[in-house]
Image: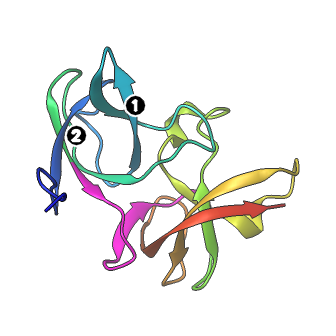
Amino acid sequence: MSQSNTKEGDLLIAANEDLSLLADVLVAPYNNAGALVVTRPAANNDPAIYLLVYGAATGSPATVRPMTPNRSVRIVAKGTGNPGDLLVLADGVSVPADKGKVRSKSTLTAGSGTYRLVAIAEEAFVDGQLVKVRPTFGTVTV
C-alpha cells in the first residue's frame, strides 16, 4: 500500500504569522526552511486550501481544516453576495485586514484578471458574515 502516513480531518500546522486572534479565514501552505507552515494568503491567487479553525501564535500549531467539496464550511465574507455566487479570495494585498476572507466574483468590477476560485456560496451573505460555502477549486476570469 502506497498511501501510508496520510491524514484525514483537522490538522495541526505551525503558524508562520500571528494567527492567535483569528478563525474562520482561509490560510495557505508555505515552506519555511523545509517545514510546512500556514499563513493568510500573501497574494490574491495563492492556494488557500485550509480553513483556520483555531489560530495560534507564530511558530505554534494552528488547527486547520482541509477544504473539500464533501463538507460545507463557514468563512468570513467581504462584501455581499447570493446563493450560487462563485467566491474568490478577498483582496488582502490592498487591504491586509481582508486576507483570508472571501468575496463574490460578481463584485469584481475593477481590473480584469484570473482569480483563484475557492468556494460557492450556499446562502445570501453580507459583509463580515460567516457565510456557508461549498469548497471547490479552479480559476475564474473577469
Which residue, given by chain and number where applicable, does mark 1 sit on?
30
Q: If the image is split into quadrants, where does the N terminus sit?
A: bottom left
Q: Position of residue 57 (x, y in %)?
A: 20, 25
Q: Is residue 75 magenta?
A: yes
Quadrant location of the C terminus in the rendered image: bottom right
Q: Position of residue 17 (x, y in %)?
A: 33, 24
Which residues are the magenta region?
Answer: 64-79
Residue at the location (88% across, 51% down)?
A: 112
Against 96, residue 44 (above or below) is: below
Q: Secondary structure at mark 2?
A: loop
Kindly check if marks 2 and 1 are in contact, taking CB atoms under 8 A apart as contact: no
Residue 31: image location, x then y, percent: 37, 25
Q: Is residue 43 left or right of residue 28?
A: right
Q: Position of residue 6 (x, y in %)?
A: 16, 54
User: Quick check: 80 left or right of 27?
Assistant: right
Residue 128 falls left or right of residue 27:
right
Secondary structure type for disc 1: strand
Q: Which amino acid type is marked by label 2?
A: Gly
Residue at point 54%, 82% (across, down): 124
Q: Which circle's residue, 2 or 1, is located before the other in the chain?
A: 1
134 or 74, nearer to the observer: 134
Residue sitting at the far front: 1
- The residue under label 1 is which amino acid type? Tyr
Residue 109 disc label: none
Q: Note whether 69 is above or below 15 in the view shown.
A: below
Q: Toward which corner of the image does residue 18 lie, by quadrant? A: top left
- Looking at the image, residue 108 lies above or below residue 73: above
Q: CA distance from mark 2 to mark 1?
A: 16 Å
